[in-house]
Image (cartoon, helix red, strand yellow):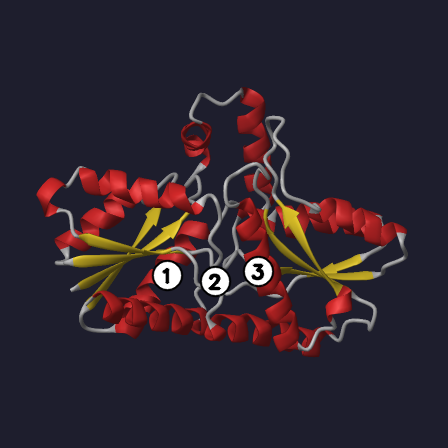
Amino acid sequence: MTGVLLLMFGSAAKDDDLEAFLAEILGRAPTRAQVEDLRRRYSRIGWSPLVEITTDLAKKLADSLGDGFTVAVGARHGSPAIALGIEELVQRGAERILAVTLAPQESPDSARYVQSVQESLACLGEKAPEVVFVTAWWERPDFITALGERLRSFIRSHNPAADTVFMFTAHSLPSSMQGAGRYVDQLLATAWKVAGCAGVDSRLCQLVFQSRGRFGRAEWLGPGLLEQIELAGSQGVKQIVVVPVQFLCDHLEVLYDIDVQARELATAMGVSLLRPPMFNSDGDLVAVLSALVREGATAVA
């Protein structure tokens, strides 16, 4: 039996969990201002559907894979914890586990997922199964095609103006983190491949970063989404299409940072901001992950 562990960052399940969730991320007790800021953002979107979407994705992936596979979800922060996901897979008879990060590009942050899994395995001792990590799968032609076709379909249905600017977004990280340059290179390649697949003129495209850390003084990867929206508005741009290439589903960084914060800024600048729908647990993403898992399982068998 091959187990599949879908790794996600995680989300606070309810309001009462906010302080503990933030403390886990920060490694210390959050301030009241930090808790209230997160509560405000969650409240604006009616809370994050991340856990529900990922759980549904796991069920659909299990159905697609069929006999010989079992799938669970593990969150680095919040619930269901990575340790719980591994325990579920072991209880179902998994002899080996493919741990797949639900972010196609390998970022400096990927190592923290690996560390979290390894710490959970250490608690199992001799009962720990073999684990193979899949932390970068952005180059898969089926992923590029799926994202590109989604963008192409969105363009057909919304018929954006010829001079519309396409901003491909990804989560920003401190630029000093080891591997940040490789992360940027992967994102650039992803964005340009997707644009080509969708038939978008590369001269209208740019890679921007969003959701920078709100605390501390570290320098983060840029240019930032909000800054680029302001710049575009000041240059007379009337329409922007924001295309996440690192996020796969609706969650706080999409539903608030793009759909609320970025759109409100764009509106104030006289700019229309559009965004294609996310994969969530749709069949095209299930197909990509199913093929990825089958290939990975064959390689380690």
- Which residue reaches farthest left? 126
Residue type pointed to by label 1: Asp
Q: Is residue 46 visible?
A: no
Residue at left offset 63%, top offset 26%:
217
Q: Position of residue 96 (x, y in %)?
A: 18, 58
100 sits left or right of 216 in the view: left
Residue at left offset 74%, top offset 73%:
201
Going from N to C along the chain, the mark reached first, 1 or 2, is: 1
Q: Tag 1: Cα neighbours inside 10 Å, few (<14), some, or many (≥20)? A: some
Q: Which residue is mark 2?
A: 280
Residue 260, relative to residue 175: is it above or below?
below
Residue 38, relative to residue 293: is it above or below?
above
Disc ID at residue 56 = 1
Q: Which residue is mark 3?
A: 245
Q: Position of residue 189 (x, y in %)?
A: 59, 63
**In the figure, residue 174 lies in which quadrant?**
top right
Quarter of the picture containing the C terminus is bottom left
